[in-house]
Image (cartoon, coloured by chain):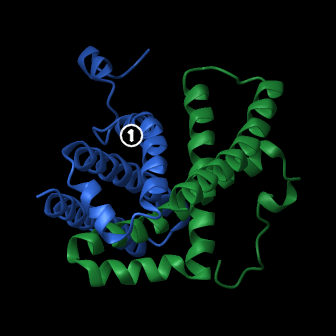
Amino acid sequence: MAEGRARPLSPHLQVYRPQLTSVLSILHRATGFALAVGTLFLAWWLIAAAAGPDAYALVESFFGSWFGYLMLIGFSWALMYHLCNGIRHLAWDAGWGFDLAAAYASGWTVVAASFVFTALAWFAGLAIAG
Amino acid sequence: MTLQSPLARARGLGSAKEGAHHWWMQRVTAVALVPLTILFIGLLAVCAGAGYEGFVALMRHPLVAAFMALVVGAGLYHMKLGVQVIVEDYVHHEGAKTALLLLLTLGTVALGTACLVSIVMLAF
């Protein structure tokens, strides 16, 4: 191995044309990881509330900034997507919706639902916040 | 033909003695998180404009405190299981993988403890 030429490798992901099913699959993992990072910030918010008004004010000023809003919008969409696609996965675990037509129909439903529910949550949040 | 004893087959466990435990707990926490997440989004929407006083007053209610504890417990457990699979899939160096998995487990427990203590402090 040390002196040999580069040995041929089996085809990797990039030789395959992306499809809805594969894109949504990796998106489930990507949003899951993003939510894990976001969870650290949610924990910061909760711990700051217990620490007192000054710590809480810092959290509020962070989430009130444009970067904070960007994070919250991204987090809320990732949460909605992971929730909807997670339900799709649970249906598969129960043995439902495995044929190709159903997998595509549920896939597009998840994409649409993730955006609709994100928008609804923001409408509700902004309406309550006034 | 199987080389397993009838008892081993009944237990359904592999050589690591865990079998489908990781897979199953990922599903159990997922099912729990469906209603918890929907309610949590509602709580976040309410908290958005509540400020410090409003949030602390909300957390003082035992039902809200209990609900938050469930979100933290199920959420962090689910998160730990998911990130563990990502590390196992993509980190191939044995030492780095072990170190990351150790950090993940200890970090999740530390974060969960800090969150639960915060919830208790806010509730009382």
Q: Nearer the viewer, residue B100 or B8?
A: B100
User: Compared to A104, does B61 lie above or below?
Assistant: below
Left or right: residue B11 compared with residue A23: left
Left or right: residue B110 compared with residue A9: left
Residue name at image x 69 percent, y 85 percent: A3
Q: Which element carries disc 1, helix, strand or loop?
A: helix
Type of the residue with mark 1? Thr
Can residue A12 be seen here? The reply is no
Mark 1 crowd level (few <14, some 14–19, many ≥20, 10 Å Cα)? some
Left or right: residue B101 compared with residue A22: left
Q: Nearer the viewer, residue A117 or A20?
A: A117
Q: Position of residue A17 (x, y in %)?
A: 89, 53
Q: Residue furthest front?
A: A130
Q: Position of residue B28 (x, y in %)?
A: 38, 34
Can residue B119 be seen here? The reply is yes
User: Compared to A50, does B112 lie above or below?
Assistant: above
Give the drawing colour for chain A. Answer: green
Residue name at image x 42 percent, y 71 percent: A41
Give the drawing colour for chain B. Answer: blue
Q: Quadrant of residue B7?
A: top left
Residue where numbered disc 1 is placed: B29
Q: Nearer the viewer, residue B81 or A35?
A: A35
Residue name at image x 61 percent, y 27 percent: A92
Give the quadrant of the C terminus of chain B: bottom left
Q: Position of residue B40 (x, y in %)?
A: 43, 48
User: Compared to B31, does A31 lie above or below?
Assistant: below
Give the quadrant of the N terminus of chain B: top left
Q: Position of residue A81 (x, y in %)?
A: 63, 48
Residue name at image x 29 percent, y 17 percent: B10
User: Compared to A68, does B55 lie above or below?
Assistant: above
Q: Chain of mark 1?
A: B
